[in-house]
Structure formats: structure tokens, C-alpha cells
Image (cartoon, helix red, strand yellow):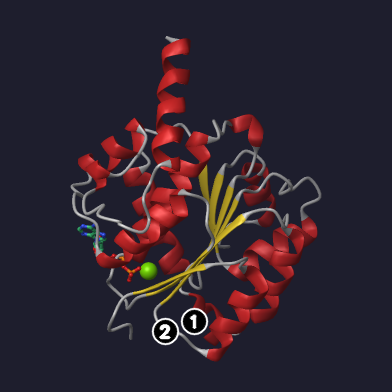
Amino acid sequence: KRKRDEEDLDALNQRVQDLNVEENDYSTFANLPLSQPTASGLEASHFKALTDIQKQAVPHALKGSDILGAAKTGSGKTLAFLVPVLENLYRRKWTELDGLGALILSPTRELAIQIFEVLRKIGRYHTFSAGLVIGGKSLQEERERLGRMNILVCTPGRMLQHMDQTAAFEIDNLQMLILDEADRIMDMGFQRDVDAIIEHLPRKRQTLLFSATQTKKVSDLARLSLRDPEYVSVHGAA
Ligand code: ADP
Ligand code: MG
């Protein structure tokens, strides 16, 4: 069984390597090289065809590229980063022992909760632990759970508070940083918090930045956080 699993993982890794991002005709999730848990989670959630921004972003993100993505509200940006988060940790055989693998920053508690709910739906067949860090509970209570999480969805202020105050908070292993609704993160005045968070993170990581609009502040943040990104945008971005 174990040998079989390793062969499956090798085959999956090979298929990701072989992804053709130039010819890109991955119009359904079933056409993409995805793990069984993710494929099943998407199917059970009734997601079949990719939206335009997903079509453009997911193949690059699966291959490990940084992404600067722009597409208007409602275009499906959440799955454009959640699918790669699940896959890239899965292909690295991420377990509880590996600690925090992906950090997702969202401007508001409401949006963070929405992302977390989508993650729970499409991630239901994975074994990763996932948590929300949005305040509203005592720091102590959040702190105790933080150390056990593989994927965190959080608001910038609260995250920084933990990084500054939670001694045992381990982020040296972090593989992926997601900045969702980056324009709103900046508009809401979180620039310094985000800068400080990024300073705490390992440099060797994958960063996906999504935004509904392309503003000066967003390109400043992109310059600071991304390395050699793929630019993906959907016509008619707000
Ligand atoms: P955005 O973050 O760009 O505003 P969301 O990720 O919140 O967009 O998605 C908007 C809506 O589209 C949600 O209701 C979501 O369930 C739906 N959606 C996203 N991707 C797909 C897809 N591939 N197929 C069908 N519906 C989708
Ligand atoms: Mg969104």
C-alpha cells in the first residue's frame, strides 16, 4: 500500500512537471494533475469547470511560481489559491509534524471566515489541520492551537500580534504566503502590519497575491513580496 502511494505521488509530481502552461487548455478540474483528496473535495462541492482566473493562475501556481493576479470580485479567486495550497502541501507530504505550511492573509474577519469555509469544503478529504486567526478569542486560546496548524487563515493585525508575542510560533517551514484582496488590505491601512509579517517569513517561499484592482499600493506590495511573478489578469478587472 505504502509503495503504491509513493508511486502515485511520483506520477502526480511528473504530471505537474509536465503541465503545459503555454498551451493551457485545462478547462476542468478533472483535466488538471490534482491529488485524489482535492479532486474528490472539488467534486463533492460541485466545482467542475475552472473560471477564467483559475484557468490562468492554477497551472502556474501548481508549478510553484509566484502569482500576481487581478480579477474582479466574484470571479473565483478563492479556489485559484486554495487548490494550489492543498496540492503543493500534499505533494510535499506535509504532516502535522511539519508545522505551518501556508499562511493566508485576508483584510476582514468576514472574508477570512468565508475562505476558511471554502477550505473546509474542498479540503474535507485531506488530513491537514487548518485554523482561523481573526481575534475574538483570547490570544492564549488562539496561541495554544496555532502550533498545531498546517494552514492558517488570518487578518494581518491579529497575525502580527501572535508573531510578536507567541514565542513558540514556528514559521521557519512556511512554504506559501497568500495575500488575498490585497487592494483592500492596503486600503484598510494594513501596509505596515503586512510588511512586518513578511519580514518574519522565510524568503524561500511561494507567494500568491490576488486583488480586484491594480493600484499603486498593490504594485508596491507586489514588489516587496513576490519573486519573478507570473502576471495573470482577467479582462474587465474592476
Ligand atoms: P472572488 O474572490 O474573486 O470575489 P470567490 O472565490 O468568492 O470570488 O467566488 C465567487 C463565487 O463563485 C462563489 O460563490 C464560488 O462558489 C463561485 N465559484 C468559484 N469558482 C467556481 C467554479 N470553478 N465553478 C463554479 N462556481 C465557482
Ligand atoms: Mg475573494
Q: Position of residue 175 (x, y in %)?
A: 61, 48
> Would residue 178 be found to the left or right of residue 98 on screen?
left
Going by the numbered disc 1, the residue's amino acid type is Asp
To which residue does mark 1 refer?
183
- Is 10 drawn above or below residue 18 in the view shown? above
> Would residue 235 be found to the left or right of residue 105 on screen?
left
- Is 223 drawn above or below residue 4 in the view shown? below
Residue ID at (71%, 58%) = 162
Q: Position of residue 9 (x, y in %)?
A: 45, 27
> Would residue 74 be found to the left or right of residue 120 on screen?
left
- In this view, the residue in front, 31 or 115, is 31
- Residue lying at the far right of the rendered structure: 167
Q: Are marks 2 and 1 in contact (CB under 8 Å)?
A: yes
Residue 213 - label = 2
- In this view, the residue in front, 233 or 72, is 233
Cα–Cα span, label 2 and label 1: 6 Å
Dot 2 lies on which element?
Answer: loop
Decide if residue 190 is in sight here.
Answer: no
